[in-house]
Image (tube, rainbow, N blue to C red):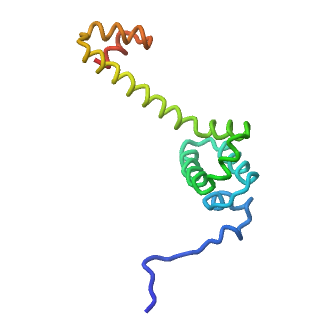
């Protein structure tokens, strides 16, 4: 008996209408520049947070599948701007995490040099424009 573990459906993305099935075709390699542009415009038009998160996942797969074409688009100022706008929340999250790590390393370095809490607090306020409360969180 030929049985499968779960129902299976094969989708041949090259046979799909690109305009009707943008999300599915974006998951496979071989996208053309105008397809990627249309795809990015669809993502940019999304307003709901959950929709954007799902779209970001599809975009990540699409970029990996179409790395060569994306590299070519890197020089296109409009495409770079569109990608940056779409990825802005993730970029901001990474920047904040990096900032936090940098501050924690600075505090450790100050401690290693023998600085006390009062001096570290002063340095944090001077170098990061922290309030007393913000500096206190890193002690």
Point out the image quarter for the C terminus. Answer: top left
Note whether 7 is above or below 93 in the view shown.
Answer: below
Residue depicted at 59% across the width and 50% down the height: 59
Q: Position of residue 54 (x, y in %)?
A: 55, 50
Q: Is residue 117 left or right of residue 99?
A: left
Q: Position of residue 76 (x, y in %)?
A: 73, 40
Give the number of callouts: 0
- The one nearer the camera, 97 or 69, is 69
Residue depicted at 54% across the width and 46% down the height: 53
Point out the image quarter for the N terminus. Answer: bottom left
Residue depicted at 48% across the width and 33% down the height: 93
Q: Is residue 117 left or right of residue 60?
A: left
Q: Position of residue 38 (x, y in %)?
A: 73, 50
Q: Position of residue 90 (x, y in %)?
A: 52, 38
Query: On the image, which quarter does residue 28 sit in?
Result: bottom right
Q: Specify the farthest residue to the bottom.
A: 1
Q: Specify the farthest residue to the right.
A: 34
Q: Is residue 60 left or right of residue 103?
A: right
- The one nearer the camera, 46 or 73, is 73
Query: On the image, which quarter does residue 86 sit in?
Result: top right
- The one nearer the camera, 52 or 80, is 80
Query: On the image, which quarter does residue 18 sit in?
Result: bottom right
Note whether 111 is above or below 83 in the view shown.
Answer: above
């Amino acid at each position: 008996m030929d049985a499968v573990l779960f129902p299976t459906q094969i989708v041949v993305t090259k046979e799909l209408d690109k305009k009707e099935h943008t999300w599915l075709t974006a998951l496979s390699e071989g996208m053309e520049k105008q397809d990627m542009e249309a795809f990015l415009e669809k993502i940019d038009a999304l307003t709901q947070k959950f929709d954007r998160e799902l779209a970001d996942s599809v975009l990540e797969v699409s970029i990996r599948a179409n790395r060569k074409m994306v590299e070519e688009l890197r020089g296109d100022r409009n495409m770079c701007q569109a990608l940056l706008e779409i990825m802005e929340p993730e970029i901001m999250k990474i920047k904040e995490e990096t900032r936090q790590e940098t501050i924690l390393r600075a505090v450790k370095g100050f401690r290693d040099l023998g600085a006390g809490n009062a001096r570290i607090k002063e340095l944090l306020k001077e170098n990061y424009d922290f309030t007393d409360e913000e500096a206190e969180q890193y002690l």
